[in-house]
Amino acid sequence: VSAEDDNPLIRKLERIYPLVAEERAFILAACTRRVEIRARHDIVREGDRPTESGMLLEGMAFRYKILADGRRQIFSFHTPGDMFDAQSFLLEQMDHGVAALTRCSLASISHRTLHQITERFPNLTRAIWKDTLIEAAILREWMASIGCRSSYERIAHLMCEMVSKYEVLGLAKDGAIDWPITQLELGDALGMTAVHVNRTLQQLRADGLITLHGRKLVVLQWEELKRVALFAPRYLHASPREFGSRRQPSSIDSEIPLTV
Amino acid sequence: VSAEDDNPLIRKLERIYPLVAEERAFILAACTRRVEIRARHDIVREGDRPTESGMLLEGMAFRYKILADGRRQIFSFHTPGDMFDAQSFLLEQMDHGVAALTRCSLASISHRTLHQITERFPNLTRAIWKDTLIEAAILREWMASIGCRSSYERIAHLMCEMVSKYEVLGLAKDGAIDWPITQLELGDALGMTAVHVNRTLQQLRADGLITLHGRKLVVLQWEELKRVALFAPRYLHASPREFGSRRQPSSIDSEIPLTV
DNA sequence: CGGGGCGTTGACTGAGATCAATTATGGTGG
DNA sequence: CCACCATAATTGATCTCAGTCAACGCCCCG
Protein backbone atom coordinates (compact mmCIF):
# COMPACT_ATOMS: atom_id res chain seq x y z
CA VAL A 1 0.00 0.00 0.00
CA SER A 2 1.63 3.23 -1.14
CA ALA A 3 1.17 6.62 0.48
CA GLU A 4 -1.03 7.60 -2.43
CA ASP A 5 -3.50 4.86 -1.67
CA ASP A 6 -3.78 6.17 1.85
CA ASN A 7 -4.85 9.61 0.72
CA PRO A 8 -8.66 9.59 0.59
CA LEU A 9 -8.75 12.65 -1.66
CA ILE A 10 -6.63 10.95 -4.31
CA ARG A 11 -8.77 7.85 -4.03
CA LYS A 12 -11.88 9.92 -4.53
CA LEU A 13 -10.55 11.93 -7.45
CA GLU A 14 -9.39 8.68 -9.08
CA ARG A 15 -12.92 7.37 -8.80
CA ILE A 16 -14.43 10.32 -10.57
CA TYR A 17 -11.60 11.07 -13.01
CA PRO A 18 -8.42 9.09 -13.78
CA LEU A 19 -5.18 10.86 -12.82
CA VAL A 20 -1.61 10.46 -13.99
CA ALA A 21 1.32 9.89 -11.64
CA GLU A 22 2.53 13.48 -11.72
CA GLU A 23 -0.89 14.75 -10.68
CA ARG A 24 -1.14 12.26 -7.83
CA ALA A 25 2.30 13.25 -6.63
CA PHE A 26 1.43 16.94 -6.73
CA ILE A 27 -1.71 16.45 -4.65
CA LEU A 28 0.14 14.28 -2.20
CA ALA A 29 2.85 16.88 -1.75
CA ALA A 30 0.23 19.61 -1.44
CA CYS A 31 -1.78 18.34 1.49
CA THR A 32 0.78 18.46 4.20
CA ARG A 33 -0.61 20.40 7.11
CA ARG A 34 -2.66 18.18 9.44
CA VAL A 35 -5.21 19.37 11.96
CA GLU A 36 -7.36 17.61 14.53
CA ILE A 37 -10.76 19.03 15.40
CA ARG A 38 -12.87 17.97 18.35
CA ALA A 39 -16.42 16.78 17.78
CA ARG A 40 -19.04 19.55 17.52
CA HIS A 41 -16.43 22.26 17.00
CA ASP A 42 -16.27 24.65 14.07
CA ILE A 43 -13.76 24.06 11.29
CA VAL A 44 -14.65 27.20 9.32
CA ARG A 45 -17.18 29.87 10.20
CA GLU A 46 -19.46 31.99 8.05
CA GLY A 47 -17.65 35.22 7.27
CA ASP A 48 -14.16 33.67 7.40
CA ARG A 49 -11.73 34.30 4.54
CA PRO A 50 -9.64 31.11 4.52
CA THR A 51 -6.30 30.96 2.71
CA GLU A 52 -6.44 27.21 2.40
CA SER A 53 -9.07 24.57 1.71
CA GLY A 54 -9.59 21.64 4.03
CA MET A 55 -9.93 18.00 3.18
CA LEU A 56 -11.37 15.39 5.51
CA LEU A 57 -9.04 12.49 6.29
CA GLU A 58 -11.04 10.87 9.06
CA GLY A 59 -14.34 11.53 10.78
CA MET A 60 -17.50 13.25 9.69
CA ALA A 61 -18.27 16.94 9.22
CA PHE A 62 -21.23 19.01 8.12
CA ARG A 63 -21.92 22.35 6.45
CA TYR A 64 -24.51 24.63 7.99
CA LYS A 65 -25.85 28.13 8.10
CA ILE A 66 -27.53 29.92 11.00
CA LEU A 67 -30.15 32.56 10.21
CA ALA A 68 -30.19 35.86 12.06
CA ASP A 69 -32.74 34.56 14.57
CA GLY A 70 -30.91 31.33 15.33
CA ARG A 71 -32.60 28.82 13.06
CA ARG A 72 -30.04 26.42 11.62
CA GLN A 73 -29.99 24.62 8.31
CA ILE A 74 -27.54 21.77 7.71
CA PHE A 75 -26.67 21.33 4.03
CA SER A 76 -24.52 18.23 3.83
CA PHE A 77 -22.65 15.59 5.74
CA HIS A 78 -19.07 14.94 4.71
CA THR A 79 -17.03 11.76 4.71
CA PRO A 80 -13.28 11.15 4.30
CA GLY A 81 -11.92 12.44 1.00
CA ASP A 82 -14.35 15.38 0.81
CA MET A 83 -12.95 18.86 0.17
CA PHE A 84 -15.65 20.48 2.23
CA ASP A 85 -14.59 24.04 1.47
CA ALA A 86 -13.05 23.85 -1.98
CA GLN A 87 -15.29 26.81 -2.78
CA SER A 88 -13.22 29.11 -0.55
CA PHE A 89 -10.49 28.92 -3.19
CA LEU A 90 -12.60 31.00 -5.58
CA LEU A 91 -15.16 32.63 -3.25
CA GLU A 92 -13.20 34.79 -0.84
CA GLN A 93 -15.67 34.84 2.01
CA MET A 94 -17.46 31.86 3.52
CA ASP A 95 -21.24 32.16 3.18
CA HIS A 96 -21.73 29.23 5.58
CA GLY A 97 -19.86 27.32 8.24
CA VAL A 98 -18.40 23.84 8.48
CA ALA A 99 -18.28 21.93 11.75
CA ALA A 100 -17.03 18.56 12.93
CA LEU A 101 -19.71 15.99 13.71
CA THR A 102 -17.20 13.59 15.22
CA ARG A 103 -13.55 14.06 16.04
CA CYS A 104 -12.05 14.95 12.67
CA SER A 105 -8.63 14.71 11.14
CA LEU A 106 -7.99 17.17 8.31
CA ALA A 107 -5.38 17.94 5.71
CA SER A 108 -5.34 21.32 4.05
CA ILE A 109 -4.27 22.60 0.65
CA SER A 110 -3.32 26.24 0.31
CA HIS A 111 -5.19 28.36 -2.21
CA ARG A 112 -1.82 29.15 -3.72
CA THR A 113 -1.35 25.47 -4.50
CA LEU A 114 -4.86 25.19 -5.89
CA HIS A 115 -4.06 28.16 -8.11
CA GLN A 116 -0.99 26.34 -9.37
CA ILE A 117 -3.11 23.29 -10.09
CA THR A 118 -5.43 25.35 -12.28
CA GLU A 119 -2.39 26.78 -14.07
CA ARG A 120 -0.49 23.55 -14.65
CA PHE A 121 -2.85 20.58 -14.33
CA PRO A 122 -6.03 21.03 -16.36
CA ASN A 123 -6.96 17.42 -15.82
CA LEU A 124 -6.72 17.75 -12.05
CA THR A 125 -8.61 21.02 -12.23
CA ARG A 126 -11.48 19.31 -14.01
CA ALA A 127 -11.45 16.53 -11.42
CA ILE A 128 -11.77 18.92 -8.50
CA TRP A 129 -14.30 21.08 -10.33
CA LYS A 130 -16.31 17.96 -11.12
CA ASP A 131 -16.27 17.06 -7.45
CA THR A 132 -17.77 20.44 -6.54
CA LEU A 133 -20.45 19.85 -9.18
CA ILE A 134 -21.35 16.47 -7.72
CA GLU A 135 -21.73 18.17 -4.37
CA ALA A 136 -24.14 20.63 -5.94
CA ALA A 137 -26.10 17.73 -7.43
CA ILE A 138 -26.39 16.16 -3.98
CA LEU A 139 -27.51 19.51 -2.64
CA ARG A 140 -30.30 19.63 -5.23
CA GLU A 141 -31.60 16.19 -4.32
CA TRP A 142 -31.49 17.18 -0.66
CA MET A 143 -33.54 20.24 -1.53
CA ALA A 144 -36.03 18.05 -3.38
CA SER A 145 -36.31 16.05 -0.17
CA ILE A 146 -37.11 19.05 1.97
CA GLY A 147 -39.41 20.55 -0.65
CA CYS A 148 -41.27 17.45 -1.81
CA ARG A 149 -40.82 14.45 0.45
CA SER A 150 -42.75 13.66 3.64
CA SER A 151 -40.70 13.45 6.81
CA TYR A 152 -40.78 9.64 6.67
CA GLU A 153 -39.48 9.67 3.07
CA ARG A 154 -36.91 12.33 3.89
CA ILE A 155 -35.22 10.36 6.63
CA ALA A 156 -35.34 7.20 4.52
CA HIS A 157 -33.76 9.09 1.64
CA LEU A 158 -30.92 10.49 3.71
CA MET A 159 -30.22 7.00 4.98
CA CYS A 160 -30.09 5.64 1.43
CA GLU A 161 -27.69 8.42 0.49
CA MET A 162 -25.39 7.90 3.46
CA VAL A 163 -25.28 4.12 3.00
CA SER A 164 -24.46 4.59 -0.70
CA LYS A 165 -21.65 7.00 0.13
CA TYR A 166 -20.20 4.67 2.75
CA GLU A 167 -20.37 1.73 0.35
CA VAL A 168 -18.33 3.60 -2.23
CA LEU A 169 -15.77 4.24 0.50
CA GLY A 170 -15.82 0.59 1.51
CA LEU A 171 -17.02 1.53 5.00
CA ALA A 172 -20.41 -0.21 4.94
CA LYS A 173 -20.79 -3.80 6.11
CA ASP A 174 -24.02 -5.50 5.11
CA GLY A 175 -25.97 -2.29 5.24
CA ALA A 176 -24.51 -1.21 8.60
CA ILE A 177 -22.79 2.17 8.90
CA ASP A 178 -21.61 4.64 11.49
CA TRP A 179 -24.34 7.13 12.36
CA PRO A 180 -22.99 9.89 14.61
CA ILE A 181 -25.87 12.23 13.70
CA THR A 182 -28.07 13.24 16.63
CA GLN A 183 -31.80 13.63 16.19
CA LEU A 184 -31.46 17.37 16.64
CA GLU A 185 -28.92 17.55 13.81
CA LEU A 186 -31.06 15.30 11.67
CA GLY A 187 -33.93 17.70 12.22
CA ASP A 188 -31.87 20.72 11.24
CA ALA A 189 -30.69 18.88 8.15
CA LEU A 190 -34.15 17.86 6.99
CA GLY A 191 -36.25 20.82 8.07
CA MET A 192 -38.13 19.16 10.91
CA THR A 193 -38.08 19.24 14.71
CA ALA A 194 -36.14 16.79 16.85
CA VAL A 195 -39.37 15.57 18.39
CA HIS A 196 -40.80 14.70 15.02
CA VAL A 197 -37.53 13.09 13.94
CA ASN A 198 -37.79 10.86 16.97
CA ARG A 199 -41.33 9.74 16.18
CA THR A 200 -40.50 9.18 12.53
CA LEU A 201 -37.45 7.07 13.39
CA GLN A 202 -39.64 4.93 15.59
CA GLN A 203 -41.98 4.43 12.67
CA LEU A 204 -39.06 3.33 10.46
CA ARG A 205 -38.01 0.88 13.16
CA ALA A 206 -41.54 -0.38 13.67
CA ASP A 207 -41.82 -0.98 9.92
CA GLY A 208 -38.74 -3.17 10.12
CA LEU A 209 -36.72 -1.06 7.68
CA ILE A 210 -33.84 -0.18 9.99
CA THR A 211 -32.34 -0.46 13.42
CA LEU A 212 -30.61 2.54 14.91
CA HIS A 213 -28.97 2.76 18.31
CA GLY A 214 -25.57 3.60 19.73
CA ARG A 215 -24.31 5.56 16.70
CA LYS A 216 -24.93 2.57 14.44
CA LEU A 217 -27.44 2.38 11.61
CA VAL A 218 -28.36 -0.98 10.13
CA VAL A 219 -30.57 -1.15 7.06
CA LEU A 220 -32.70 -4.28 7.30
CA GLN A 221 -34.70 -3.91 4.07
CA TRP A 222 -32.65 -2.05 1.49
CA GLU A 223 -35.05 -2.45 -1.43
CA GLU A 224 -38.01 -1.33 0.61
CA LEU A 225 -36.10 1.61 2.07
CA LYS A 226 -35.12 2.78 -1.42
CA ARG A 227 -38.73 2.39 -2.55
CA VAL A 228 -40.27 4.49 0.19
CA ALA A 229 -37.49 7.09 -0.16
CA LEU A 230 -38.01 7.41 -3.94
CA PHE A 231 -34.25 6.94 -4.09
CA ALA A 232 -32.90 7.37 -7.63
CA PRO A 233 -29.13 7.47 -7.21
CA ARG A 234 -28.32 8.99 -10.58
CA TYR A 235 -27.73 12.29 -8.77
CA LEU A 236 -24.73 10.82 -6.95
CA HIS A 237 -22.90 10.56 -10.28
CA ALA A 238 -21.03 7.48 -9.12
CA SER A 239 -20.53 4.78 -11.70
CA PRO A 240 -23.22 2.10 -11.27
CA ARG A 241 -20.47 -0.45 -10.74
CA GLU A 242 -19.79 1.16 -7.40
CA PHE A 243 -23.16 0.15 -6.03
CA GLY A 244 -22.60 -3.52 -6.90
CA SER A 245 -21.68 -4.58 -3.40
CA ARG A 246 -25.19 -4.82 -1.99
CA ARG A 247 -25.78 -8.44 -0.98
CA GLN A 248 -28.98 -9.24 -2.80
CA PRO A 249 -27.94 -10.90 -6.08
CA SER A 250 -30.83 -11.90 -8.27
CA SER A 251 -31.40 -12.77 -11.91
CA ILE A 252 -33.01 -9.38 -12.42
CA ASP A 253 -29.98 -7.59 -11.00
CA SER A 254 -27.66 -9.22 -13.48
CA GLU A 255 -29.92 -8.43 -16.41
CA ILE A 256 -30.39 -4.77 -15.60
CA PRO A 257 -27.18 -3.78 -13.88
CA LEU A 258 -27.93 -0.07 -14.13
CA THR A 259 -30.88 -0.31 -11.76
CA VAL A 260 -29.69 0.29 -8.25
CA VAL B 1 -20.89 49.23 -27.98
CA SER B 2 -18.79 46.31 -29.17
CA ALA B 3 -20.03 42.79 -29.79
CA GLU B 4 -18.38 41.75 -26.56
CA ASP B 5 -20.50 44.11 -24.50
CA ASP B 6 -23.57 42.52 -26.01
CA ASN B 7 -22.67 39.08 -24.77
CA PRO B 8 -24.28 38.65 -21.36
CA LEU B 9 -21.98 35.78 -20.43
CA ILE B 10 -18.88 37.89 -20.96
CA ARG B 11 -20.47 40.71 -18.99
CA LYS B 12 -21.20 38.32 -16.16
CA LEU B 13 -17.78 36.70 -16.11
CA GLU B 14 -16.18 40.16 -16.15
CA ARG B 15 -18.21 41.03 -13.08
CA ILE B 16 -16.97 38.06 -11.14
CA TYR B 17 -13.44 37.82 -12.54
CA PRO B 18 -11.56 40.20 -14.85
CA LEU B 19 -10.74 38.76 -18.29
CA VAL B 20 -8.11 39.64 -20.85
CA ALA B 21 -8.90 40.38 -24.50
CA GLU B 22 -7.86 36.98 -25.78
CA GLU B 23 -10.20 35.25 -23.33
CA ARG B 24 -13.10 37.48 -24.26
CA ALA B 25 -12.48 36.80 -27.92
CA PHE B 26 -12.38 33.06 -27.37
CA ILE B 27 -15.69 33.05 -25.52
CA LEU B 28 -17.26 35.26 -28.14
CA ALA B 29 -16.12 32.95 -30.94
CA ALA B 30 -17.28 29.92 -28.96
CA CYS B 31 -20.93 30.76 -28.43
CA THR B 32 -22.15 30.73 -31.96
CA ARG B 33 -25.12 28.43 -32.23
CA ARG B 34 -28.36 30.25 -31.35
CA VAL B 35 -31.61 28.55 -30.37
CA GLU B 36 -35.06 29.86 -29.54
CA ILE B 37 -37.21 27.99 -27.03
CA ARG B 38 -40.91 28.59 -26.46
CA ALA B 39 -42.18 29.39 -22.99
CA ARG B 40 -42.79 26.36 -20.74
CA HIS B 41 -40.84 24.03 -23.02
CA ASP B 42 -37.90 21.89 -21.96
CA ILE B 43 -34.38 22.98 -22.84
CA VAL B 44 -32.66 19.89 -21.38
CA ARG B 45 -34.28 16.90 -19.71
CA GLU B 46 -33.16 14.69 -16.88
CA GLY B 47 -31.29 11.75 -18.34
CA ASP B 48 -29.99 13.68 -21.37
CA ARG B 49 -26.30 13.54 -22.24
CA PRO B 50 -25.68 16.95 -23.83
CA THR B 51 -22.57 17.60 -25.93
CA GLU B 52 -22.81 21.34 -25.39
CA SER B 53 -23.72 23.68 -22.56
CA GLY B 54 -26.35 26.36 -22.97
CA MET B 55 -26.18 30.01 -22.01
CA LEU B 56 -29.20 32.24 -21.64
CA LEU B 57 -29.17 35.34 -23.86
CA GLU B 58 -32.74 36.51 -23.28
CA GLY B 59 -35.68 35.34 -21.21
CA MET B 60 -35.95 33.35 -18.04
CA ALA B 61 -35.44 29.63 -17.39
CA PHE B 62 -35.57 27.31 -14.42
CA ARG B 63 -34.02 24.04 -13.27
CA TYR B 64 -36.28 21.35 -11.87
CA LYS B 65 -36.59 17.73 -10.97
CA ILE B 66 -39.70 15.56 -10.97
CA LEU B 67 -39.88 12.70 -8.48
CA ALA B 68 -41.15 9.29 -9.55
CA ASP B 69 -44.68 10.11 -8.37
CA GLY B 70 -44.90 13.46 -10.11
CA ARG B 71 -43.96 15.91 -7.36
CA ARG B 72 -41.81 18.69 -8.78
CA GLN B 73 -39.06 20.72 -7.16
CA ILE B 74 -37.76 23.87 -8.84
CA PHE B 75 -34.16 24.67 -7.87
CA SER B 76 -33.37 28.00 -9.47
CA PHE B 77 -34.54 30.71 -11.83
CA HIS B 78 -32.07 31.84 -14.47
CA THR B 79 -31.51 35.22 -16.04
CA PRO B 80 -29.50 36.32 -19.11
CA GLY B 81 -25.82 35.41 -18.84
CA ASP B 82 -26.41 32.24 -16.83
CA MET B 83 -24.79 29.02 -18.02
CA PHE B 84 -27.65 26.95 -16.71
CA ASP B 85 -26.07 23.58 -17.53
CA ALA B 86 -22.34 24.19 -17.29
CA GLN B 87 -22.32 21.07 -15.16
CA SER B 88 -23.09 18.87 -18.17
CA PHE B 89 -19.53 19.58 -19.35
CA LEU B 90 -18.15 17.44 -16.52
CA LEU B 91 -21.16 15.36 -15.45
CA GLU B 92 -22.16 13.28 -18.46
CA GLN B 93 -25.78 12.72 -17.62
CA MET B 94 -28.30 15.36 -16.52
CA ASP B 95 -29.67 14.65 -13.06
CA HIS B 96 -32.36 17.31 -13.51
CA GLY B 97 -34.10 19.24 -16.27
CA VAL B 98 -34.03 22.84 -17.42
CA ALA B 99 -37.11 24.51 -18.92
CA ALA B 100 -37.98 27.90 -20.35
CA LEU B 101 -40.17 30.08 -18.14
CA THR B 102 -40.64 32.64 -20.90
CA ARG B 103 -39.64 32.55 -24.54
CA CYS B 104 -35.88 32.08 -24.36
CA SER B 105 -33.00 32.82 -26.64
CA LEU B 106 -29.92 30.67 -26.07
CA ALA B 107 -26.35 30.39 -27.23
CA SER B 108 -24.45 27.18 -26.73
CA ILE B 109 -20.82 26.28 -26.17
CA SER B 110 -19.65 22.80 -27.11
CA HIS B 111 -18.04 20.69 -24.43
CA ARG B 112 -15.07 20.39 -26.76
CA THR B 113 -14.61 24.14 -26.55
CA LEU B 114 -15.01 24.11 -22.78
CA HIS B 115 -12.35 21.42 -22.67
CA GLN B 116 -10.05 23.67 -24.67
CA ILE B 117 -10.73 26.50 -22.25
CA THR B 118 -9.61 24.33 -19.32
CA GLU B 119 -6.47 23.39 -21.26
CA ARG B 120 -5.50 26.85 -22.46
CA PHE B 121 -7.18 29.50 -20.30
CA PRO B 122 -6.79 28.83 -16.58
CA ASN B 123 -8.12 32.28 -15.77
CA LEU B 124 -11.28 31.70 -17.76
CA THR B 125 -11.61 28.25 -16.24
CA ARG B 126 -11.55 29.75 -12.75
CA ALA B 127 -14.16 32.32 -13.78
CA ILE B 128 -16.60 29.70 -15.05
CA TRP B 129 -15.88 27.40 -12.11
CA LYS B 130 -16.48 30.31 -9.75
CA ASP B 131 -19.79 30.95 -11.42
CA THR B 132 -20.88 27.35 -10.77
CA LEU B 133 -19.83 27.82 -7.13
CA ILE B 134 -21.94 30.95 -6.78
CA GLU B 135 -24.87 29.00 -8.12
CA ALA B 136 -24.27 26.38 -5.44
CA ALA B 137 -24.20 29.14 -2.81
CA ILE B 138 -27.57 30.41 -4.04
CA LEU B 139 -28.87 26.86 -3.91
CA ARG B 140 -27.84 26.59 -0.27
CA GLU B 141 -29.64 29.79 0.70
CA TRP B 142 -32.71 28.55 -1.18
CA MET B 143 -32.50 25.36 0.84
CA ALA B 144 -32.27 27.37 4.05
CA SER B 145 -35.47 29.08 2.94
CA ILE B 146 -37.37 25.86 2.46
CA GLY B 147 -35.93 24.29 5.58
CA CYS B 148 -36.11 27.23 8.00
CA ARG B 149 -38.24 30.09 6.75
CA SER B 150 -42.01 30.42 7.04
CA SER B 151 -43.90 30.63 3.78
CA TYR B 152 -44.27 34.39 4.17
CA GLU B 153 -40.52 34.79 4.70
CA ARG B 154 -39.75 32.39 1.86
CA ILE B 155 -41.64 34.33 -0.76
CA ALA B 156 -40.22 37.60 0.54
CA HIS B 157 -36.72 36.13 0.35
CA LEU B 158 -37.10 34.93 -3.22
CA MET B 159 -38.32 38.38 -4.19
CA CYS B 160 -35.27 39.99 -2.56
CA GLU B 161 -33.03 37.60 -4.44
CA MET B 162 -34.67 38.17 -7.81
CA VAL B 163 -34.67 41.94 -7.44
CA SER B 164 -30.97 41.85 -6.47
CA LYS B 165 -30.13 39.74 -9.51
CA TYR B 166 -32.06 42.03 -11.82
CA GLU B 167 -30.37 45.08 -10.36
CA VAL B 168 -26.94 43.67 -11.10
CA LEU B 169 -28.13 43.12 -14.68
CA GLY B 170 -29.49 46.66 -14.84
CA LEU B 171 -32.99 45.32 -15.48
CA ALA B 172 -34.67 46.66 -12.34
CA LYS B 173 -36.33 50.07 -12.32
CA ASP B 174 -37.14 51.46 -8.90
CA GLY B 175 -37.75 48.05 -7.43
CA ALA B 176 -39.90 46.91 -10.34
CA ILE B 177 -38.99 43.74 -12.22
CA ASP B 178 -40.43 41.22 -14.65
CA TRP B 179 -42.15 38.39 -12.81
CA PRO B 180 -43.20 35.66 -15.25
CA ILE B 181 -43.43 33.06 -12.44
CA THR B 182 -46.91 31.60 -11.93
CA GLN B 183 -48.16 30.81 -8.45
CA LEU B 184 -47.95 27.11 -9.25
CA GLU B 185 -44.29 27.45 -10.17
CA LEU B 186 -43.62 29.56 -7.12
CA GLY B 187 -45.15 26.81 -5.03
CA ASP B 188 -42.96 24.12 -6.60
CA ALA B 189 -39.91 26.33 -6.09
CA LEU B 190 -40.58 27.02 -2.41
CA GLY B 191 -42.14 23.76 -1.29
CA MET B 192 -45.69 24.99 -0.83
CA THR B 193 -49.00 24.61 -2.61
CA ALA B 194 -50.33 27.10 -5.14
CA VAL B 195 -53.31 27.82 -2.90
CA HIS B 196 -51.08 28.77 -0.03
CA VAL B 197 -48.82 30.81 -2.31
CA ASN B 198 -51.90 32.75 -3.31
CA ARG B 199 -52.94 33.52 0.25
CA THR B 200 -49.39 34.45 1.23
CA LEU B 201 -49.03 36.82 -1.72
CA GLN B 202 -52.22 38.51 -0.62
CA GLN B 203 -50.74 38.97 2.81
CA LEU B 204 -47.61 40.55 1.33
CA ARG B 205 -49.82 42.90 -0.67
CA ALA B 206 -52.02 43.70 2.31
CA ASP B 207 -48.91 44.54 4.33
CA GLY B 208 -47.95 47.06 1.66
CA LEU B 209 -44.63 45.38 0.87
CA ILE B 210 -45.25 44.68 -2.80
CA THR B 211 -47.62 44.87 -5.70
CA LEU B 212 -47.81 41.99 -8.14
CA HIS B 213 -50.03 41.74 -11.17
CA GLY B 214 -49.64 41.17 -14.89
CA ARG B 215 -46.15 39.61 -14.72
CA LYS B 216 -44.80 42.68 -12.91
CA LEU B 217 -43.46 42.77 -9.40
CA VAL B 218 -42.99 46.10 -7.64
CA VAL B 219 -41.29 46.25 -4.27
CA LEU B 220 -42.84 49.08 -2.26
CA GLN B 221 -40.83 48.72 0.95
CA TRP B 222 -37.39 47.33 0.21
CA GLU B 223 -35.97 47.64 3.72
CA GLU B 224 -39.00 46.04 5.30
CA LEU B 225 -39.06 43.24 2.73
CA LYS B 226 -35.41 42.46 3.40
CA ARG B 227 -36.08 42.50 7.12
CA VAL B 228 -38.94 40.04 7.10
CA ALA B 229 -37.07 37.81 4.62
CA LEU B 230 -33.93 37.72 6.80
CA PHE B 231 -32.14 38.63 3.58
CA ALA B 232 -28.35 38.61 4.01
CA PRO B 233 -27.00 38.94 0.48
CA ARG B 234 -23.49 37.75 1.23
CA TYR B 235 -24.40 34.42 -0.37
CA LEU B 236 -24.83 36.09 -3.77
CA HIS B 237 -21.08 36.81 -3.82
CA ALA B 238 -21.61 39.99 -5.79
CA SER B 239 -19.43 42.93 -4.85
CA PRO B 240 -21.37 45.26 -2.53
CA ARG B 241 -20.87 48.06 -5.04
CA GLU B 242 -23.30 46.27 -7.32
CA PHE B 243 -26.19 46.81 -4.99
CA GLY B 244 -25.67 50.55 -4.86
CA SER B 245 -28.35 51.40 -7.36
CA ARG B 246 -31.29 51.24 -4.98
CA ARG B 247 -32.96 54.66 -4.98
CA GLN B 248 -33.01 55.43 -1.30
CA PRO B 249 -30.00 57.66 -0.73
CA SER B 250 -29.52 58.69 2.87
CA SER B 251 -26.70 59.84 5.05
CA ILE B 252 -26.56 56.41 6.62
CA ASP B 253 -26.24 54.77 3.23
CA SER B 254 -23.21 56.81 2.41
CA GLU B 255 -21.58 56.13 5.72
CA ILE B 256 -22.05 52.39 5.70
CA PRO B 257 -21.94 51.46 2.03
CA LEU B 258 -21.53 47.75 2.75
CA THR B 259 -25.01 47.46 4.23
CA VAL B 260 -27.46 46.48 1.53
C1' DC C 1 -66.94 33.81 -28.20
C1' DG C 2 -65.49 29.85 -26.10
C1' DG C 3 -62.07 27.19 -23.77
C1' DG C 4 -58.09 26.47 -20.87
C1' DG C 5 -54.81 28.17 -17.84
C1' DC C 6 -54.29 30.84 -13.89
C1' DG C 7 -55.85 33.18 -9.84
C1' DT C 8 -59.02 33.35 -5.97
C1' DT C 9 -62.04 31.84 -2.25
C1' DG C 10 -64.13 28.78 1.40
C1' DA C 11 -64.54 24.72 4.32
C1' DC C 12 -62.30 21.01 6.20
C1' DT C 13 -58.31 18.07 7.46
C1' DG C 14 -54.02 16.63 8.95
C1' DA C 15 -48.93 16.47 9.30
C1' DG C 16 -45.88 18.23 11.96
C1' DA C 17 -44.73 22.10 15.48
C1' DT C 18 -44.81 23.41 20.21
C1' DC C 19 -44.60 22.90 25.11
C1' DA C 20 -43.37 20.30 28.92
C1' DA C 21 -41.81 16.41 31.40
C1' DT C 22 -39.37 12.20 32.03
C1' DT C 23 -35.99 8.78 31.00
C1' DA C 24 -31.59 7.00 28.92
C1' DT C 25 -26.66 7.57 27.99
C1' DG C 26 -22.04 8.55 27.86
C1' DG C 27 -18.17 11.09 29.44
C1' DT C 28 -15.74 13.00 33.74
C1' DG C 29 -13.58 13.53 37.97
C1' DG C 30 -13.26 11.93 42.72
C1' DC D 1 -15.67 1.93 40.25
C1' DC D 2 -19.25 4.97 40.91
C1' DA D 3 -21.67 9.41 41.52
C1' DC D 4 -22.63 13.20 38.75
C1' DC D 5 -23.86 16.05 35.01
C1' DA D 6 -24.88 17.45 30.47
C1' DT D 7 -26.56 15.88 26.36
C1' DA D 8 -29.66 13.03 23.79
C1' DA D 9 -33.76 10.30 23.39
C1' DT D 10 -38.50 9.61 24.39
C1' DT D 11 -43.37 10.43 25.52
C1' DG D 12 -47.90 12.90 25.90
C1' DA D 13 -51.05 16.71 25.14
C1' DT D 14 -52.28 20.46 22.47
C1' DC D 15 -52.18 23.66 18.71
C1' DT D 16 -51.51 25.65 14.13
C1' DC D 17 -49.82 26.31 9.71
C1' DA D 18 -50.36 24.68 5.54
C1' DG D 19 -52.38 20.95 2.56
C1' DT D 20 -56.55 19.16 0.33
C1' DC D 21 -60.75 19.39 -2.12
C1' DA D 22 -63.89 21.85 -4.64
C1' DA D 23 -65.92 25.60 -6.84
C1' DC D 24 -65.84 29.82 -9.32
C1' DG D 25 -64.14 33.98 -11.75
C1' DC D 26 -61.00 36.16 -14.81
C1' DC D 27 -58.40 36.95 -18.68
C1' DC D 28 -55.88 36.00 -22.55
C1' DC D 29 -55.58 33.85 -26.97
C1' DG D 30 -57.05 31.31 -30.69
Image: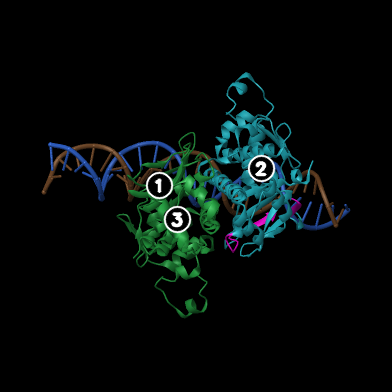
Chain colours: A green, B cyan, C blue, D brown
**Res B14 label:** 2
| Percent coordinates x, y for residue B53 in the rendering | 66, 57
**Res A185 label:** 1
Would you say the residues marked 3 and 2 are in contact, meaning their CB atoms lie under 8 Å apart?
no
| Percent coordinates x, y for residue A175 in the rendering | 37, 65
Q: Nearer the viewer, mark 2 or mark 1?
A: 2
Label 3: few (<14), some (14–19) or many (≥20) C-alpha neighbours in 10 Å: some
Q: Which chain contains the residue that carries disc 3?
A: A
Residue range highlighted in magenta = B90-106
Check if mark 2 and mark 1 are on a common chain. no
**In what element is the residue under mark 2?**
helix
Which amino acid, mark 3?
A: Phe
In the image: residue A183, left or right of residue D23: left
Q: On the image, numbered disc 3 is attached to which residue?
A: A26
Which amino acid, mark 1?
A: Glu
| Cα–Cα span, label 3 and label 1 | 37 Å
Q: Can residue B81 be seen at all in this image of the molecule? A: no
**In what element is the residue under mark 1?**
helix
Locate the C terminus of chain B by quadrant.
top right
- Compared to residue D6, the image places residue B250 above or below, namely above
**In what element is the residue under mark 3?**
helix
Q: Which chain contains the residue that carries disc 2?
A: B
Check if mark 3 and mark 1 are on a common chain. yes
In the image: residue A221, left or right of residue B237: left
Locate the N terminus of chain B by quadrant.
top right
